[in-house]
Amino acid sequence: MTPQALETLGTRIDEVFLLIGAAILLIELAEVLFKGSHKGRTIAEMLVSASTQIPSIAVQVFILTGAYIIYYILAEVAQPWQIPLTWWGIALAVIAADFTYYWEHRIAHQVRILWTQHAVHHSSRDYNIITGIRFGPLEGVWNLIMHIPLVFLGFSPEMIFFGIIVVLAYQTWIHTEVIGKLGWFDKVMNSPANHRVHHGCDDKYIDMNYGGITVIWDQLFGTYQAEEETPRYGLKRDFDSRNPIKVWFSELPGLWHDVTRARSWGEAWRYMMRPPGWKPSADRGE
Ligand SMILES: [Zn+2]
């Protein structure tokens, strides 16, 4: 297979999931219009989720496009061997991207400076197909950094980008309440039920189901939780806004508040690098 053919395949896969997403969106909109009791609020929530694409795409165009070149330079100068562009090589790239996504996602939940970006995806009290395109402005930067090690494993940049696209495209259809539990499928693959759990802020659901395409990594590393009662969606703290600016930058004022009041550089650093909600008293065992 040629790199161009792989790029075309990535685009086709993306389009297929986009079509499935569009079909689910139509069902969700019909539900809101004919059955929904808070029509205005639900539509406003969808619009603010969609608005997060504005800064996200701007970052993509102005920062990330240039940064992709880093992959080609690294592949040129520092790649120990090359995994061939065959079907098994491509399958390996998707598995590697799915594994990387699990850790990228898990770390983004546990390091507050990264959480300032990923929290945007989690800050809606609703859960629908548009939540799937609700991203923090700089989330793509962390994604790019975390996949660099795949170059050193021998994957070409084209294979890595293909893996990233497939892992993200797959997740389009799982942001919905229209599809219920799926039996054995929920045990192995990421699914609407599994991802609803991930968006829940209830104690039993918080920080569970980080998987992208599969939940095998969650099963292996002890972060799998099946859906039981319907989750309460959104952040643990009180946040519910339809103001785009507040949604795009929701976590920054809180982090700024804590960092500027830290009593030392070390404490400021720990506020940024420890999990959200960390306080200095936690280190003193209080
Ligand atoms: Zn998450």
Image (cartoon, helix red, strand yellow):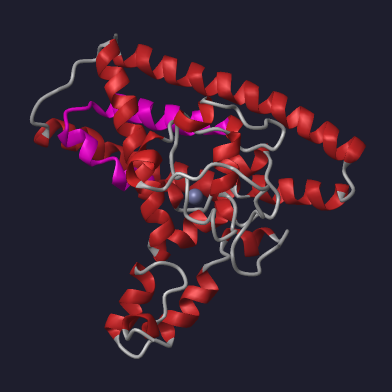
Q: Height in image: 178 above or below 105?
A: above
- The quarter holding residue 66 reads top left
Q: Nearer the viewer, residue 53 or 62?
A: 53
Q: Is residue 47 left or right of residue 40?
A: left
> How far across and down, in percent of the image, does residue 265 sit?
29, 83
Outermost bottom residue: 263
Q: For the C terminus, which image quadrant?
A: bottom left
Q: Residue at x 42, y 75 (%)?
A: 278
Q: Residue at x 90, y 39 (%)?
A: 35
Q: Where does the image place residue 43, in percent across and percent down from the top left?
A: 80, 46
Front in this rendered view, residue 187 or 164: 187
Highlighted magenta segment, given as a residue range? 143-172
> Nearest the camera: 210 or 114?
210
Q: Eyeballing the image, is 275 above or below 86?
A: below
Answer yes or no: is residue 133 visible. no
In the image, residue 137 above or below residue 181? below
Queried whether the magenta region covers residue 227, the answer comes back as no
Q: Which residue does the image show at 68% across and 47% down from the upper left?
A: 230
The residue lying at 38 percent from left, 75 percent from top is 271
Q: Residue 275: x percent and y percent?
A: 40, 67
Q: Is residue 128 left or right of residue 161?
A: right
Q: Look at the image and tell me in which quarter the N terminus lies.
A: top left
